[in-house]
Amino acid sequence: MDQIIQLAYLLAAISFILGLKFLSSPETAAHGMLLSQGGMFIAIVATLLYNGVVSYGLILGGIVVGSAVGAIMATKLQMTDMPQMVALLNGFGGLASALVAGAEFFRSQANLTPYPMVTIALTLLIGLVTLTGSLVAFAKLQELMRGAPIIFPFQHGMNLLFFLATLGLIASLAITPTATPVFWALIVIASILGVLVVIPIGGGDMPVVISLLNSYSGMAAAASGFILNNNVLIISGSLVGSAGIILSQLMCKAMNRSLTNVLFAGFGQVNTPSKPVSSQGKPQGTPEEVQSCSPEEAAAFFKKAKSVIIVPGYGMAVAQAQHSVKELASYLGDQGTDVRYAIHPVAGRMPGHMNVLLAEANVPYDQLIDMDEINEDFPETDITLVIGANDVVNPAADTDPDSPIYGMPILHVDQSKRVMVLKRSMKPGFAGIQNPLFFKKNTMMIFGDAKGTIDQIANALK
């Protein structure tokens, strides 16, 4: 029986690896999901064949309840809420690993030696940091708490102190596994550490945070695999952990920043704009003024356009405007206009956020073009429509060495023949700086709710 179980685990691991490979392309992502789900089903069935399973009734109850909750979440969840749900699911993964560590500690406490005790303690540490950090990320994305960085004096020193305290507690448990109060102290301090690690990270860095927390949940699962001596947990956890780290690095590269800068710099604090802004959205005390137009005037320009590039940003997600954007693109396509979408890697609040939203609206994958591929096409584009994007189209990243986003790769929308920017106001993005794009002669601002504005443009095109 043990050989059959191990063979099933090997088959499940192969399914996970191939599924992860297929997820790298939108065309094969659905197959990758099915393959990975099949691998997980095989792993669960194989695990249930172990003689050590105590209560099939409890396991069946957990499967029923978990499946019901998952089905409700999958059917009721709006795609615009996907980032916070991903953050929450990362936290659940950390919680599961922490519960495994706690159960093993109290089950085997009297017989624990230093090596398994350290494994249990590390699993608990990573799992709880993932849990509480993910809950903070969820609260920020759900706007239950301030999305900007929360900074206080000696913050980094306090984080370091808490981290060293966890190492000291782990060492103490390795020496004296029966010290239950030390175990509870580790739970408390690890939970606090997870909160402290995430609160200084700004909303614009949430794609990196989510992928990093995903990596943590994978590492916690791999560690719990060592506790249970379960090969498929070790393999699957390692895959998730390494994929999350790689994705985090890719996100940082897209922002031209290091991972340590994202985690410790407190980037994204809300600063007062250098140019005061009036209630009408125009800067005061400066000769520069933005050009604005109505949706009906914008529609007149779109009727003459032969090529249009749409740049979605977080504002599109907030307004839930993806279906209206697709409808507008369809009208433009019907009149013979070439329409494409320029996707910046860190637009939105999670990796691939814009791709997910546009896929929900059935936008064809071949119209979604990555930043590196589409940047050279902007000079030949009649109209670039920017929907709620800010820092990812800010030319200061190329021209102003004193700008906090200098060197960040951006979409060169300012090189288009005409730029139309949909925003509610002149409020700056998460970097807290003004965007020179808004004041350029070829830029026209359209103020208002993105969904309502796009619907008005589409109606005028009819």
Image: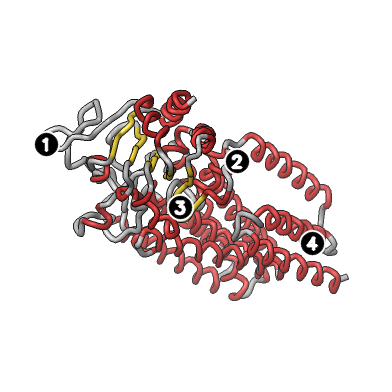
Marks 2 and 3 sit apart, C-alpha to C-alpha, by 23 Å
Residue in the foreground of this view, choosing between 226 and 370: 370
- Amino acid type for the residue under numbered disc 2: Asn
Q: Indicate which disc, 2 or 3, sits on the residue closer to the N terminus.
A: 3
* Relative to 105, 348 lies left or right: left
Residue 453 left/right relative to 244: left
- The residue that label 4 is drawn on is 47
Question: Is residue 151 in sight in this rendering?
Answer: no
Q: Is residue 384 visible?
A: yes
Image: 387 above or below 198: above
Q: Is residue 393 left or right of residue 180?
A: left
Which numbered circle lies on residue 207? Answer: 3
Residue 169, image x, y percentages: 48, 66
- The residues bearing labels 2 and 1 have C-alpha atoms spaced at a distance of 44 Å
Q: Residues within 10 Å of mark 4 (few under 14, many from 20)?
A: some
Mark 2 residue crowding within 10 angstroms, few (<14) / some (14–19) / many (20+): few
**Label 2 residue SS:** loop
Q: Three-letter amino acid code at disc 4?
A: Thr
Which residue occupies 31% across, 57% down? 265
- Tell me: 120 left or right of 68: left
For the residues labelled 2 and 3, say whether their Cβ atoms are less than 8 Å apart. no
Q: CA separation, marks 2 and 4?
A: 39 Å
Ranked by sequence position, the earlier of labels 4 and 1 is: 4
Residue corresponding to mark 2: 362
As helix, strand or loop, the secondary structure at mark 3 comes to helix
The residue indicated by pointer 1 is 287
- Type of amino acid under label 1: Pro
Disc nearer the start of the sequence (2/4): 4
Choose mark 2 or mark 3, whichever is in front.
Answer: 2
- Closer to the chain start, of discs 3 and 4, is 4
Alpha carbon distance from label 3 to label 4: 34 Å
Query: Image point 15% across, 37% down: which residue?
Result: 288
